[in-house]
Image (cartoon, rainbow, N blue to C red):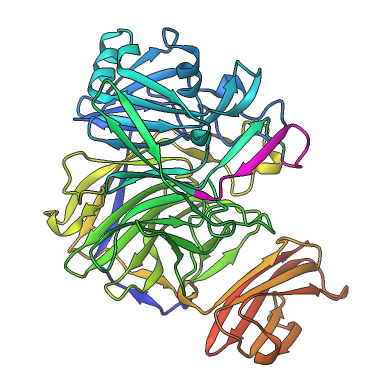
């Protein structure tokens, strides 16, 4: 990132922490809202999942309650699910369900959790419809919620970690996976995993009593759609039409690193966004789509989470352990269709945002697809919604030391104020996001041997250099355009033994573009 590459786009955010007395933490849940009340179901009551199969996603961390949170009264209610049929009860306590609200109904698909029928963990093959006004009232009154819930079974709904959106009169179930068994980071025999590699498209006909659905031909792509645990946000495209964009996600088929590319989804099909790389906010996190009709710019804001890269001292650090971060960044598309990434002059107040949700105020001005209409907002400081829950981590990288005490489900609610028309500081353009060169080095950290993958939009001359902490060049390689190809160019590098452990700077230069990233040698 260039230290001098700044942009003032007239908005930033202020996050005001607040508490609802007694409300606990929650992450990876499903939600809907009616008037001032949130309905919450599923998710986890603990922090980052542990790596041991016997401890990962254990029953103790399941959320077995249905929740209503009334922000106007700063009050909440809960209701046990014991009166619900087993299939409904088990799905509604699962994690990483796909969900979307349409009017008074919340539609929930899939999710991962314990299934009594198989005496093991798995992915639920259900579509569940919940009438929000009815179930919210039932929870407040302590009544049976069953009359307000309906469920259908179909193996095409057995997805977790994907995203559910409505566009036009159809529903789009994007990406995700089917995961059966107990998690194991070493690909042991405790689970099977299958990415959908699809956008599954279907319609719903629902009169509140009878529901029917029908699937259409899906969009399938083994490369672009092999992703999960990410953000898919509604868009206003430069031509004025509605669309969706899938941002980053994990994992690349050939290496356990996040995707840097993003995918547009329309009623006609899918397409990779050319000439753009997303370096921040790679996993699912609290996010907000806004469209400014005055500048004809679509803004997508991501609050914290987990990412392979984070900004530091005007530059960018690459950490292939993919740490928790506090970065608040936006990905914006202008009237000409140019997409770029910007770091905002505000951060999350801690390593927060992962598996959290941004819940907008229901009376905001929205476009029909749920994008906030920025031009219709009034005032310099506007409360636009709240961020609730997610994982609060005590350190950036905790996965391999995680015994359940290094993170927790956050109970903090942040009131989110949009600041416009007043001095808010400068966004910093991540100029690498629009670079024709994409660079990933892995593993990172490493012991002096690593692979360097350089993805190019066109063949070009390249200069590759590695500097130690004192600024001395320790490795150098020059490639002519004839020795590079469009797409991935992978090279193996070995650091001479005379150089020790420490932080190194990798620099790749081509056609006036310089990409700089940090490597850690141990």
Q: Nearer the viewer, residue 510 or 495?
A: 510
- Residue 440 falls in which quadrant of the image? bottom right
Q: Nearer the viewer, residue 321 or 482?
A: 482
Looking at the image, residue 403 lies above or below residue 422? above
- Please say whether residue 174 is one of the residues in the magenta stretch: no
- Find residue 215 and report its horizontal and vertical position in percent: 41, 40
Relative placement, left or right, of 160 versus 367 is right
Q: Nearer the viewer, residue 256 or 419?
A: 256
| Magenta segment | 185-198
Relative placement, left or right, of 233 versus 521 is left
- Find residue 39 and report its horizontal and vertical position in percent: 32, 26
- Please say whether residue 190 is one of the residues in the magenta stretch: yes
Report the residue at 43% width, 13% height from top. Answer: 81
Q: Quadrant of the C terminus?
A: bottom right
Residue 147 seen in this snapshot = yes
Looking at the image, residue 313 lies above or below residue 393? below
- Residue 213 falls in which quadrant of the image? top left
Count of picture labels: 0
- Find residue 454 and report its horizontal and vertical position in percent: 64, 75
- Find residue 408 and report its horizontal and vertical position in percent: 53, 33
Relative placement, left or right, of 71 versus 438 is left
Relative placement, left or right, of 54 versus 322 is right
Residue 19 seen in this snapshot = no
């Amino acid at each position: 990132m260039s230290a001098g590459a700044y942009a003032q786009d007239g908005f930033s955010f202020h996050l005001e922490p607040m508490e609802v007395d007694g409300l606990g933490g929650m992450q990876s849940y499903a939600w809907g809202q009616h008037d001032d009340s949130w309905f919450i179901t599923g998710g986890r009551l603990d922090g980052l999942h542990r790596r041991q199969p016997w401890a990962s996603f254990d029953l103790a961390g399941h959320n077995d309650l249905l929740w209503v949170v009334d922000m106007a009264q700063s009050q909440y209610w809960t209701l046990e699910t014991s009166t619900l049929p087993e299939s409904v009860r088990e799905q509604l306590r699962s994690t990483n369900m796909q969900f979307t609200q349409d009017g008074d109904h919340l539609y929930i698909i899939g999710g991962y959790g314990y299934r009594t029928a198989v005496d093991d963990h798995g992915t639920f093959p259900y579509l569940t419809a919940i009438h929000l006004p009815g179930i919210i009232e039932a929870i407040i009154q302590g009544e049976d919620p069953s009359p307000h819930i309906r469920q259908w079974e179909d193996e095409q709904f057995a997805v977790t970690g994907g995203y559910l959106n409505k566009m036009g009169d159809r529903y789009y179930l994007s990406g995700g996976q089917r995961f059966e068994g107990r998690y194991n980071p070493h690909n042991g025999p405790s689970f099977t995993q299958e990415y959908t590699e699809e956008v599954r498209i279907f319609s719903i006909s629902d009169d509140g009593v009878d529901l029917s659905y029908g699937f259409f031909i899906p969009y399938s792509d083994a490369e672009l759609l092999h992703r999960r645990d990410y953000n898919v946000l509604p868009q206003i495209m430069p031509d004025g039409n509605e669309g969706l964009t899938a941002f980053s996600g994990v994992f690349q088929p050939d290496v356990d690193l996040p995707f840097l590319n993003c995918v547009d989804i329309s009623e006609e099909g899918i397409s990779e966004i050319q000439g753009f790389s997303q370096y921040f906010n790679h996993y699912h996190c609290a996010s907000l789509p806004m469209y400014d009709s005055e500048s004809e710019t679509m803004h997508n804001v991501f609050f914290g989470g987990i990412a392979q890269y984070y900004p530091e001292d005007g530059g960018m650090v690459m950490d292939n352990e993919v740490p928790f971060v506090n970065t608040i960044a936006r990905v914006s598309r202008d009237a000409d269709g140019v997409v770029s990434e910007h770091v905002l002059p505000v951060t999350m107040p801690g390593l927060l945002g992962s598996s959290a949700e941004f819940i907008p105020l229901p009376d905001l001005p929205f476009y029909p697809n749920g994008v906030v209409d920025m031009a219709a907002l009034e005032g310099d400081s506007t409360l636009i919604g709240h961020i609730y829950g997610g994982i609060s981590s005590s350190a950036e990288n905790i996965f391999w030391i995680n015994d359940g005490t290094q993170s927790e489900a956050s109970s903090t609610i942040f009131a989110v104020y949009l600041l416009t028309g007043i001095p808010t500081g400068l966004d910093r353009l991540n100029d690498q996001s629009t670079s024709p060169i994409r660079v990933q080095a892995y593993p990172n950290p490493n012991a002096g041997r690593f692979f360097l993958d350089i993805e190019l939009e066109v063949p070009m001359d390249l200069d590759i250099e590695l500097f130690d902490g004192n600024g001395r060049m320790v490795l150098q390689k020059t490639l002519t355009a004839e020795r590079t190809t469009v797409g991935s160019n992978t090279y193996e590098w070995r650091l001479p033994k005379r150089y020790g452990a420490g932080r190194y700077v990798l620099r790749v230069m081509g056609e006036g573009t310089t990409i700089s990233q940090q490597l850690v040698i141990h």
